[in-house]
Amino acid sequence: MIADRAENAGQALWFGDNLMTVRVAAGSGDDDISIVECRMPRDGSTPLHVELSGDEIVHVIEGTLRFRVDGNYFFCHSGQTVVAPKGLPHTFRIEPGEGGTCLVVTQGDEFERMVREMCLPASAGYPVRTERAPQAGQDFFDGPATSRFQVVGAPLP
């Protein structure tokens, strides 16, 4: 039953001072699609990372994000969507303003699982600083090379 497999959808988690909410859990459908809403403060940035199991789609709900995808830099504004192709290093940073919100769509559970393993429940308070943040060169999963998420560099300055 789909409801049983989606029991963790809606869970809000702190990743440092980023509020991550799993909107669609990977196990909720047959295609293993995961959607995570990310609310980040101004100047927040993801580490440079690579998904090896599928593309990452980032849809900007609010704010302006500066992206780096495979060495190319560009801005994305509210209502725009970026696809970071599988295997290419990418990162983004929230530009000046009040912060930003985006949806991160991935296939497979690697990103969602990393979020769940690296974050703390939002009920723990705001914001939660943790030593569990990903470091460059860190592999999150020991599975085959085609099903991993890897941090390969620092966030955008």
Image: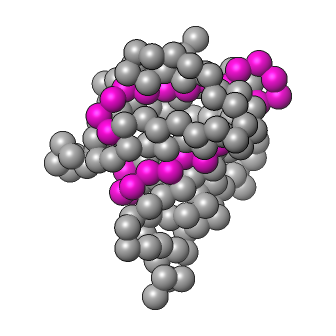
Which of these two is toward me, 43 or 75?
Answer: 75
Residue drawn at (54%, 46%), measured in percent from left and top? Answer: 104
Residue 43 image position (x, y, % from top left): 69, 20
Magenta-colored stretch includes residue 92: yes
x%, y% of residue 81? 58, 40
Residue 78 falls left or right of residue 72: right
Q: Which residue is drawn at 54% across and 23% down?
A: 67
Residue 94 occupies which quadrant of the picture?
A: top right
- Which residue is outermost to the right? 98
Q: Residue at point 64% right, 64% down? A: 10
Q: Is residue 107 left or right of residue 52?
A: right
Is 154 drawn above or below residue 8 in the view shown?
Answer: above
Is residue 60 among what the camera can see?
yes
Residue found at the very far left of the displayed protein: 144
Which quadrant would residue 12 be assigned to in this image?
bottom right
Q: Give the range drawn in magenta.
A: 86-110
Name the one closer to the observer, 83 or 149. 83
Estimate the x, y position of residue 1 in percent, counting from the top left.
Answer: 46, 88
- Residue closest to the eye, 121 or 22: 22
Q: Position of residue 84 (x, y in %)?
A: 43, 35
Colour scheme used in the picture?
one colour
The residue sitting at 29% across, 47% down in the picture is: 53
Would residue 39 be seen by someone viewing this image from the given angle? no
